[in-house]
Amino acid sequence: MNPLNYDVVVVGGGAAGIFAAINVANNNPNLKVVVLEKTSQLLAKVKVSGGGRCNVTHACFDPNELIKYYPRGSKELLSAFHQFQPGDAIAWFSERNVELKMEEDGRMFPVTDSSQTIIDCFFNEIKRLNITIELQTKVEKIIKNDTNFLVTTNKQALNCKKIILTTGGFSKAENYQFITNLGHTIEPPVPSLFTFNLPKHLILNLQGIVADVEIKIVGTKFIENGPLLITHWGFSGPAVLKLSAWAARYLAGKNYEFAIEINWLPTMNEEAMMLALQTLKTNFATKKISNAFDFNLPNKLKSYLIAKAEINEDLKWADVSKKQLQQLVAILLKDKYTSKGKTTFKQEFVTCGGIKLNEVNFKNMESKLVSNLFFAGEVLNIDALTGGFNFQAAWTTAWIAALKN
């Protein structure tokens, strides 16, 4: 069977791939563009993102600030965001009658609160621009000839002039084989954005409780502030997810067994905390500790922490010893746990790892090793914190790659 001929082949039908294909076809109506997707569904991650609402981007319009949300890829993305940043993404969707709204924390969603709005927008563009979609089509090999590529799939061979690789992140290095065969190097993939497991720990009885904390990985410089959620398996919430992203490669190296330290009252230092407890001891000498423990923590968490400091919460403040006060300070400000294992954050799996960034020209997203080969999205060694930042990196890199095709 003779190969099918296309001008541009996009490998991967996720956010970056579809955005790249649409922009290529929009910029160059005469080009024949095809998207190859190995599964039976396009835009799977877009559909589930943000609890089905699709966190399209984040209202951060200064590239110098925006790059601070990317544990990997920040340096390279700075120039890219000067070409296409969240304001440009908002305008792109607005031109296609999709309006976005900003929430208090800066996250941006379609006003419909439905990811289907974004998917429908993309499908309308695919139809309008006559882009070919091939589902359940897995790329097995790519060979570069003098002027063309020969792409072999499980169904059909294709000839093309240019390729945009937008396969997303793979969990196993061997899945990148058809890319490494072209000469590219892969930073080994490890998970990012995961929650910390505390098997059978007593604190799991407090599942559902949220507290604003400072949390750090003992023996490292990895530290984060923000809400921590106690779940039935361990710790989750924004502070934990951010910490997991920054420390992704370190924690993989520790096989996900590590010590963490929590400051439950991050506005306090040890001296101020001791003074506050001594003041309670003086002012409420005849009261039970549980009835006069005036700190901004959920009641069940207060009881747990007092008990962990080996103090009976029915004890009167007057009877609390200096040693017990010191124990309580340590528990409130330096509460230690050992995490064993991880749990992926919902379905929003993000990979740390991918194409080595110094092998890509971020002015046009073209390979420095293979001419007319381009990359966009999570196939690159780029990942971000939650909040719409991973999608923004996908839109940005895809838009730039599309400009050059």
Image (tube, rainbow, N blue to C red):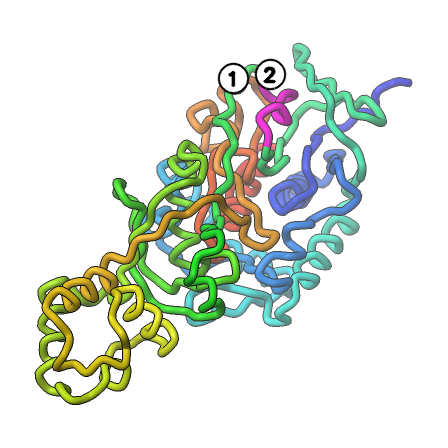
Magenta highlight range? 172-182
Which residue is tagged 1?
369
Q: Which mark is residue 182?
A: 2
Which amino acid, by three-letter code, is at mark 2? Leu
Instruction: Pick whichever, 291 or 41, lies toward us.
Output: 291
Circles 1 and 2: CB atoms closer than 8 Å: yes
- Quadrant including the N terminus: top right
Badge 1 or badge 2: first in the primary sequence: 2
Residue 87 visible in the snapshot: no
- The x and y percentages for residue 347 are 61, 52
Query: Where, by quadrant of the figure, is residue 224 drawn?
Result: bottom left
Placement of 353 over or under 140, stated as above or below = below
- The x and y percentages for residue 271 are 9, 65
- Quadrant including the C terminus: top right
Residue 404 visible in the snapshot: yes
Q: Residue at x 43, y 61 (%)?
A: 202
Q: Which mark is residue 339?
A: none
Dot 2: element? loop
Placement of 60 over or under 257, stated as above or below = below
